[in-house]
Amino acid sequence: MSESYQFQPTIVRTDRGLSIAGTRITLYQIIDYVKAKYPPEVIREHFRLTVKQTNDALAYIEQHHDEVETEYQRILRQAEENRQYWQKRNAQRFVEIASRSRKPEYQAVWEKLKAMKRQVA
């Protein structure tokens, strides 16, 4: 009787990009920690990964550095474009909200907040 093993990769490509199989964690999230020079143990604990998942992710990032870095930079640009879009789109709404008069029942809370801000400054 022969035994057969199915190889299951740790790093897979999903609609979010390169990810750790069975999780919603992308390699791009891990790259932030690698660039900040966090040790593997901290990365593993933060994302609640196994030793194998952590080691495989870090090895993949190292072995495919150029490919992963190119995708990472593209995602950073896309995230910044999205941030700017929503900031511009919501700017008028934020002005509108800030200009509203405050409800009298919250006045005491606002006064307390102002006093706390003065203490900090």
Image (cartoon, rainbow, N blue to C red):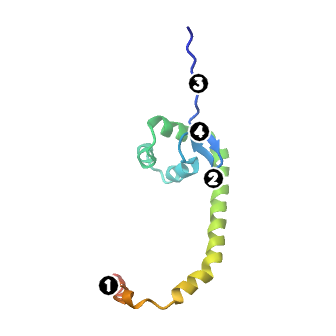
Name the disc covering residue 11, or none.
4
Q: 75 and 34: which one is in front? A: 75
N-terminal-most mark, 4 or 2: 4
Residue 79 lies in quadrant: bottom right
> Which residue is painted at 53% across and 90% down in the image?
99
Q: Residues within 10 Å of mark 3 (few under 14, many from 20)?
A: few
Circles 4 and 3, Cβ within 8 Å, touching? The answer is no
Q: Alpha-carbon distance for marks 1 and 3?
A: 63 Å
| Mark 1, residue position | 119
Q: Depth-wise, is mark 1 or mark 3 nearer the camera? A: 3
Residue 40 lies in quadrant: top left
| Mark 3, residue position | 6
Residue 112, how many percent across, how many down?
Answer: 33, 86
Q: Secondary structure at mark 1?
A: helix
Q: Residues within 10 Å of mark 2 (few under 14, many from 20)?
A: some
Name the disc covering residue 72, or none.
2
Q: Residues within 10 Å of mark 4 (few under 14, many from 20)?
A: some
Residue 16, how many percent across, how many down?
Answer: 63, 50
Amino acid type at circle 2 is: Tyr
Q: Depth-wise, is mark 4 or mark 2 nearer the camera? A: 4
* Whether residue 88 is situated above or below residue 57 in the rendered picture: below
Q: Secondary structure at mark 4?
A: strand
N-terminal-most mark, 1 or 3: 3
Q: Secondary structure at mark 2?
A: helix
Residue 97 lies in quadrant: bottom right
